[in-house]
Every structure is written in structure tokens, then in C-alpha cells.
Amino acid sequence: DGGITQSPKYLFRKEGQNVTLSCEQNLNHDAMYWYRQDPGQGLRLIYYSQIVNDFQKGDIAEGYSVSREKKESFPLTVTSAQKNPTAFYLCASSPKSRGSEAFFGQGTRLTVV
Amino acid sequence: AQKVTQAQTEISVVEKEDVTLDCVYETRDTTYYLFWYKQPPSGELVFLIRRNSFDEQNEISGRYSWNFQKSTSSFNFTITASQVVDSAVYFCATSGSARQLTFGSGTQLTVLP
């Protein structure tokens, strides 16, 4: 089945640790995105990538890092610099054409313990 | 910069009632796109509809309908004869010259049996 796979579904992190969230797509989409969702705040854009080996910061990039070495993969690292990382993280992808809808993974819920 | 406002944080209706979810957008782009997504409890965002700024025709898909009015910068979503399975968070979003989506804060719809 074509789609976007995020793993793990639940992730627990100790304070001061870096963690990496996985996002893989087999839709052959050029663009990929990471969003953060907090209760009552909707989705906020962390990073996005339009092509391999290139990515841009979104609205809340501080404390996060990404890479795009392959078209199908866009991992997100939550670093210890992110002060409040507990949230629901959603990965998405879309075709390159403007106005295309984005397709989302099932999300990763990260909790700092 | 783009902005989407969903003023209704939570709505509760009884099954079979009609319900309208409001969405107001702001954009400086002359060409832009509007979207609605549904987020069931499982967390994954499900795409419902996309409209471009040049097409103000209303659309109906089964029990769902959408009313796009450029004059009021609104893109409202109506569910007719609501069902318990419609319970979810609904997000309105927009994209323009910047391809990434900007989301509203979402409306939690609860349909009571």
C-alpha cells in the first residue's frame, strides 16, 4: 500500500536526550513536511523539504533538526535544546505541484519523562 | 503571511442534526488553495477537499458540503444529518505561493447518539 509511515507511534524521552522520529513515504512525492500539534493550537510547521538534500525552517524550527538524503525519507531529530518537546508530531508529503494536498502519517506522540 | 481562523473550538450536536464548521482565511496571494482535513481519534489527518481561489462553486459530496465565499474570505464546511462517526477534529488550511499548508487551530466536533 502507498502511504506515509511514521515510527515509533509512542516515544518517551528523558530530559537532555536527543531523539529521532522516522518518516518514510512510498508515494514518490517530492515535498515532505514535519508538523507539531499541541492541544488547542492546531498544526505548526517545523521543517519542510521540496527536494532531496534541501530543506527549510518552518515557524518553530528551534530545537529541531532534519535531513533529506533520500527522496522517501525525512527524519526529524528533537534535540535537548527543544525546551518543551512533549507533543504530537505529524509527517506529511505532497507532490511538487502547487496547491496539491498533503498526505499525512499516523503521527508520533513524544513524551518527556 | 497566511492565517486561518477557526473560531469554534468545540461543537456538540445530536445525531442527525446539521452542523456547520466555520473557517476564515487571510492571504496576500492572488492564487491560493483551501483545504479541509479530518482528524479522527487515531490521529492521522484525512484529506477531505481542496478548492482553488478561482473556483467559488460550492461543492457537495454525500452528506458533506462546502461554501466558499471570497467576499468574506470564508470556506465553511457543513455536515448534513450528522453521525457519531463524524466525531473528530476538523482543520481548515490554506496554501499559496509558499507551498506548505497553514492550518487553523481546529474544531472538535462531537456527535452524540
Image (spheres, coloured by chain):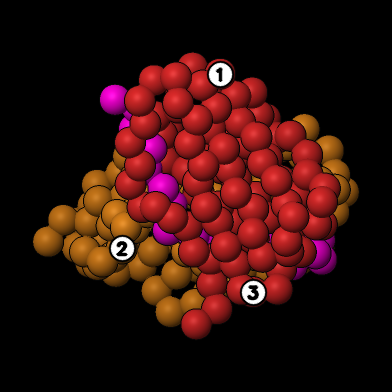
Chain colours: A red, B orange
Sooner in the amino-acid sequence: mark 3 or mark 1: 3
Camera-side residue: A21 or B24? A21
Q: Is residue A76 above or below residue B53?
A: above
Q: Which residue is pictured at 41% across the width and 34% down the height? A: A87
Q: Tag 2's secondary structure?
A: helix
Amino acid on which disc 2 is placed: Asp
Q: Quadrant of the N terminus of chain B?
A: top right
Furthest toward the left, the residue is B113
Q: Give the class, few, some or many, for how many residues have Cα within 10 Å of label 1's Cα (few <14, many ≥20).
A: some
Residue B102 point in image, percent of width and height: 65, 42
The region drawn magenta spans A94-113
Residue B74 visible at all: no
The residues tagged by marks 3 and 2 sit, at their Cα atoms, a distance apart of 27 Å
> Which quadrant of the structure image shows residue B38?
bottom left
Residue B47 falls within the magenta-colored stretch = no
The amino acid pointed to by label 1 is Ala
Which residue is outermost to the bottom?
Answer: A1
Image height check: is A41 above or below A98? above
Foreground tag (2 vs 1): 1
Q: Which residue is mark 1?
A: A81
Residue on which disc 3 sits: A27
The amino acid pointed to by label 3 is Leu
Name the secondary structure under disc 3. loop
Q: Are marks 2 and 1 in contact (CB under 8 Å)?
A: no
Residue carrying label 2: B86
- Cα separation between marks 2 and 1: 39 Å
